[in-house]
Image (cartoon, rainbow, N blue to C red):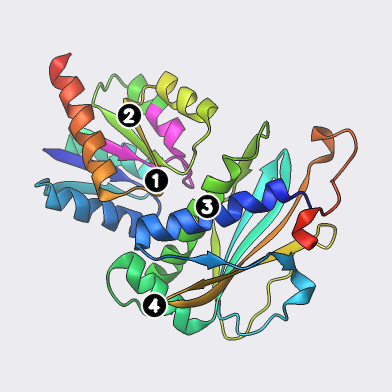
Amino acid sequence: MDASYILPFIASTKTVFSTMLQLQVSCDKPVPQAVIPTKGRDVSGIIGMSGDVLGSIVLSFSMEPAKQIVAKFVGADVPPDSEDFGDAVGELLNMICGGAKAKFEGKSVSISCPSVVVGEKHKVQQMSDALCITIPCRSDCGEFVVEVSIKEAMSSTATGPRAAASTSS
Amino acid sequence: MRIMLVDDSKTMRNIQRNILAQLGYAEIEEACDGQDALSKVAAFKPELLLVDWNMPNMDGLTFVKTYRGQGYKTPIIMVTTEAEKTRVIEAIKAGVNNYIIKPFTPETLSERVDQTLARLEAA
């Protein structure tokens, strides 16, 4: 996967959290999903991408960071089993993806309405034919990950998906 | 001033409502998508609308085109994650008066509301 598809998600995640939550987020080096075991995923927001770029983006937390981050976003504690909790997670992911896709030069991309899964230790299965990159993120409210699994639509490129570059170095 | 907030995210509507309340705007109606908004505009008669783009049932752009097609000239600010220049142009062509890209600060929302209303007065 081209680094030009990953860097916008790092930048957008930091922007969204600092602007809407006044929370500084630092992102570790992105790695293929297989490198980081799927663990403690209790809350996940999922968004699909279509158009010149196909795939899905997942924002995942364990429960405690999710509760703290939602509380900071909403301005009050929100029960994880409430609709408002899922709505808040979905909106964070919506903004992250919107900001990222705006930096995909020359690409026309649409994003779906977000879905949110709340359930102890679940796993989100990404596309099997696209590399999934995990961006580990850290904040004062805890850790979370952004998983990017996207590829260029065949009609938008003559040579097909580009190989992973500096993201894997 | 009567302001309508059109966004499928209750979180985002609450954030906007709270910011507007701090600015002194308390007469707020909410709609969760374009269709919901269309069903409410005749009765509520908003003097300003803040409209999201990506919503189920009827998206924001379709709502704006339909609303303008019904003859309403009420100022509309699009509040959306759609940040590409082409999208902004598309929204303005549809009849949007101003544009805010999410994420936004309270200061940005406040400035755009003031700017939009000032332009309306000047016109």
For the residue pair A123 and A137, the one nearer the viewer reads as A137
Whole-angstrom CA distance, mark 1 to mark 2, is: 19 Å
| Subunit that carries the residue with mark 3 | A
Q: Residue drawn at (46%, 54%), measured in percent from left and top?
A: A15
Q: Which mark is residue A68?
A: 4
What amino acid does circle 3 point to? Ser
- Residue B61 lies within the magenta run: yes
Q: Which residue is mark 3?
A: A12
For the C terminus of chain A, the image quarter is bottom right
Please say whether residue B42 is visible from this viewpoint. no
Please say whether residue A52 is visible from this viewpoint. yes
Q: How many marks?
A: 4
Residue A19's image quarter? bottom left
Q: Which residue is mark 1?
A: B33
Contact (Cβ within 8 Å) of mark 1 with mark 4: no
What amino acid does circle 4 point to? Gln
Whole-angstrom CA distance, mark 2 to mark 4, is: 33 Å
What amino acid does circle 1 point to? Asp
Most distant residue in the top direction? B123
Sequence-first disc among 3 and 4: 3
Sequence-first disc among 1 and 2: 1
| Subunit that carries the residue with mark 4 | A
- Left or right: B61 with respect to B16? right
Q: Residue drawn at (34%, 70%), measured in percent from left and top?
A: A72
Q: Which residue is mark 2?
A: B98
